[in-house]
Structure formats: C-alpha cells, structure tokens
Amino acid sequence: MLRVALVYPELLGTYGDGGNALVLGERAKRRGIEVDVVRVGLAEEIPEATIYLLGGGEDGPQRLGADLLRGSSFGARVRDGAYVFAVCAGLQLLGTSFAVEGDDEYEGLGLVRAVTRRGLVRSVGELLVQRDRATYAHGPVLALNPWLADEILSTILGEPLEPLASVADDLYAERRSALLHSSGS
C-alpha cells in the first residue's frame, strides 16, 4: 500500500499545499493502486509512510516545524528510504539552514545540502522546469503539473505508469504550450 503523509498542514499549508496529497492519492487510486493519505497533526508522532509531503509556512511556523521535525523520527525515516515532496518552506526545512526575519539564519534538518536565502526580487507566476532540475515552488504544484505527480508515483513504484487522461492534464498541456510559445522556445 502507498501511504502518503501530509505533515503538519496546520503549520505548513499556507498556500493550499494539502492539494498535493489529494492529487497523489487520486492519481494513484485511478490506476488501481491502494493508497492511504494521512494528515499528521502537531501532537502526533510521524508515522511510517512511503512519501512525506511538506508545504509552505511563514517564518514562525517554519521555525516551529523545523524544531518539531528535528525532535521526531522524520529524519531517520527519510534516511531509511522514505520519499519527500516539499514545496516552499518545506523545501527550506530539508536543507542545512534557511533565512527568517530578513537575513537571520535558522538551522534546517540537514537532509539535503542546501542553504536558502531571500532573493532581492520575488518571482511569481507560471513556471516551466526541466524534469532533472529542482525549483522552488508554492502551493498545490501537483494539481497544476499532473505529469510531475505521475513521475513521483512512477519513481516510488519503480515502474512507468500508463498515461492518465484528465482535465488537469489537458490544462497543463495548454499552459505549457502557451509558455513555450511566449518564450520563443
């Protein structure tokens, strides 16, 4: 069974990040894959899961999330092979440190070699990335990029998945085409 754990959505769910858990669960179910999507609250122990989802949060919740995760079994579960999909503050938590309140550094979980700092200019809007590159995204990224949800499921399951036609896939194809056309690619 595929177990998807949405971790601390009350802290790390500022931008509708819980939608990522819904998308993974639904795309798995539509393919006949047995899936259990669980929400892990602040007072709960981190359960065993196939994949953990971390979302976004403001500076205070982000620091609290780091502290709670540092004192839990999360790091050990990830080092033992569990997958993580993190957006926004969730990605920052995984690194060695992240910026809060301006340029102050706060200790991350050290699960990936990354230091995040605030940029001079904030970039917002649609994004187009190559599949072998990382990016910093917000919100229900998988709802807007169903191919990415399928890539994650395929990686976890260790096998390619049959295409799944949906309105989300059609909308993604239209947005991708428009972005490629506008950028001259």
Image: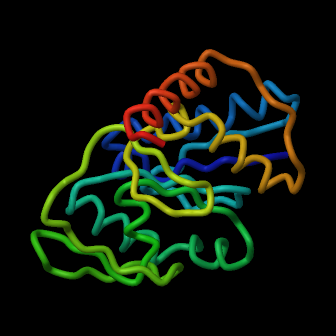
Q: Residue furthest top?
A: 167
What's the residue at 61%, 15% (across, down)? 167
What's the residue at 48%, 84% (across, down)? 113
Question: What's the colour scheme?
Answer: rainbow
7 w.r.t. 173: above or below: below
Q: Position of residue 105 (x, y in %)?
A: 21, 82
How many numbered tags mark residues here? 0
181 w.r.t. 68: above or below: above
18 w.r.t. 170: above or below: below
Q: Is residue 137 left or right of residue 27?
A: left
Q: Position of residue 148 (x, y in %)?
A: 63, 44
Q: Position of residue 174 (x, y in %)?
A: 52, 22
What's the residue at 62%, 43% (across, down)? 38
Residue 135's quadrant in the figure?
Answer: bottom left
Of residues 29 and 40, the one drawn nearer to the viewer in this rendering: 29
Q: Residue furthest left?
A: 102
9 w.r.t. 71: above or below: above
What's the residue at 39%, 36% (across, down)? 16
Q: Is residue 43 left or right of residue 155?
A: left
Q: Position of residue 77 (x, y in %)?
A: 67, 72
Of residues 94 and 77, the one drawn nearer to the viewer in this rendering: 94
